[in-house]
Amino acid sequence: MSSKAHLPPVPPANRTPHGPGGSSSEGDLSAQQAEATKSSRDRNLAEQGRQGDIKQNTTHQGYQQDR
């Protein structure tokens, strides 16, 4: 059984010629994008979109009556 503590090395064919990367500012969010992301986390998804439909259709199944 192999140890999971150390990953095997990446084969040379799978390595990028551009180097290992680094601290780039491309991943940073602007203030406007950060605010939009924060407000999207505050939404109640149980009442919106597909999640809302699923919740509506699966809640209180026992109270439905036959026609």
Image (spheres, helix red, strand yellow):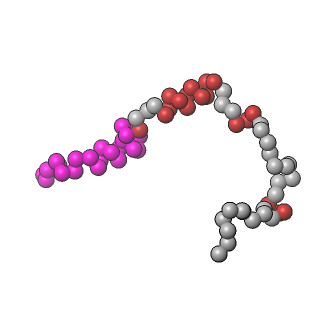
Closest to the observer: 12 or 3?
A: 3
Which residue occupies the foreground of this view, 7 or 31?
Answer: 7
Q: Is the magenta stretch mostly helix, strand or loop?
A: helix
Q: Could you tell me residue 49's position as x and y percent?
A: 41, 40
Taking the magenta stretch, the answer to whether it contains residue 64 is yes
Asked if residue 20 lies left or right of residue 30, the reply is: right
Say left or right for 45 vs 29: left
Name the residue rendered at 50%, 28% in the picture. 39
Position above or below: 29 against 61: above
> What is the quadrant of residue 15 in the picture?
bottom right
3 relative position to 59: left or right: right
Give the image location of residue 45, x and y in percent.
41, 38
| As drawn, 19 above or below 23 | below
Numbered range of the magenta stretch: 46-67
Name the residue at 13% across, 53% down.
Answer: 66
Count of numbered circles in the view: 0
Residue at 66% across, 31% down: 29
